[in-house]
Image (cartoon, rainbow, N blue to C red):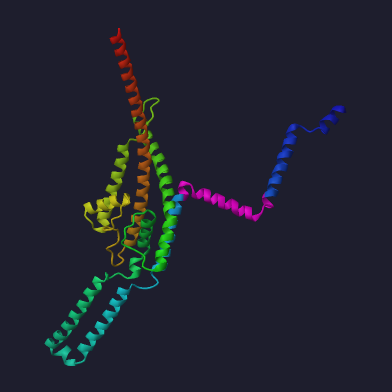
Amino acid sequence: MGSFYYTTSFPSTLTMTKMRSSSRSCNSSATSINRDPREKIKDCCRKLVAFMCTQVGVGGLVVGYAIVGALGFITLETQSEYPHVEEMQHLRKNFSEKLWTATAADRNVNVLNKTAFNRQTDGLLSEFQIEVVKAVKKGYNGKSVKDVWSLPAALMFCLSVFTMIGYGNIVPRTMWGKVATVVYAIFGIPLYVLYFLNMGKVLAQTFRWLYRWFHVCTGRKKPGQRIIVPSTACLWVIFGYILIGTIMFAQWEEWDYLDSAYFCVTSLCKIGMGDFVPGANIVEAKSGSHLKLVINFVYLLLGLGLVAMCYNLMREDVRVKARELREEIIEAFEDFKYRMVHCCRVNST
């Protein structure tokens, strides 16, 4: 009877642990339910910022930033037509009316008198040619504002702004467009630097793993050996990527291979001469031309990530070689010091 009373009066340790855990779960659920909505919003913002600072988040943020910027610049810059395009449209309309008036004034001109028809039309066409030449000297190239500021072209403009390439083939002409370019660059350049660092780290880790895996599979790795990706491997990767871009741009843009390689090198090095730009010679929207410009955008963005990867790998290689060189210099100095001391002792004796 006493033992029964003892066991029922004092519950076991396991039972107490379950009761405490259940009470904690109830308290945590009640706390999560009664938590301030502002705290929930802050928590979601913290998680969003933490995700955006990851490699995937930064890459998506850069692409989204470019798309939003492209749509914004299209909205700002396509509100009014270029003045030289409006003048050319007005000039073409006036001369077509003059040509119609001159040839329709006399019915016999169109039917019988060929010499009078040629004389009147030649004079009007010569005058029209002179006006067209003047318009071309002022900057007319046959492209309207919507042709210049298409979505792929605006993406290339945004890429050239926040990557600091600066091709210069497309520039904002409105006041708000220039203000937006300044603000876009101020926020876009730090974002690109963050992308450069994160993407370079991810690609460097991936390429380092592949390089080590290749050495292990081929049996070149010795026990205890530390495998470092050499600088020559990075140079071969960049050379292969430039070769792919050279062939691609030569086929799509109808450039020769030297010009294509020149464009790839100046773009990946962020020199941005601006004499060769994908899609700059497209007057009319051909089939697939916009898709090609988007692929060019992706090619340059990934290429800059590869440059960052090679920078990380080559920096590691240089550090290892510098450390080995320092150890060799110290060892040589110690050996020289030992020889000098030994020589002085021998001469003294």
Residue 235, located in which quarter of the rendered image? Answer: top left
Asked whether 129 falls inside the magenta stretch, the response is no
Q: Residue at x 33, y 66 (%)?
A: 148
What is the count of numbered marks? 0
Quadrant that contains the C terminus: top left
Where is residue 65 shown, x and y percent of the image?
44, 57
Up-down relation of residue 205 to residue 168 (above or below): above
Q: Is residue 97 visible?
A: yes
Residue 315, located in which quarter of the rendered image? Answer: top left
Q: What stretch is highlighted in magenta?
A: 32-57
Q: Is residue 288 visible?
A: no
Q: Which residue is drawn at 41% across and 51% down?
A: 192
In depth, the one of 219 and 342 nearer the eye is 342
Where is residue 318 shown, x and y percent of the image?
35, 35
Residue occupying the far front of the picture: 348
Quadrant that contains the N terminus: top right
Where is residue 98 shown, x and y percent of the image?
23, 86
Up-down relation of residue 116 to residue 255 (above or below): below
Where is residue 135 shown, x and y percent of the image?
25, 74
Residue occupying the far left of the picture: 115
Up-down relation of residue 99 to residue 267 (above or below): below
Asked whether 34 falls inside the magenta stretch, the response is yes
In depth, the one of 347 and 2 nearer the eye is 347
In depth, the one of 161 and 102 nearer the eye is 161
Residue occupying the far right of the picture: 1
Label the magenta part by its dominant secondary structure. Answer: helix
In depth, the one of 160 and 174 nearer the eye is 174
Lateral position of residue 139 relative to residue 207, left or right: left
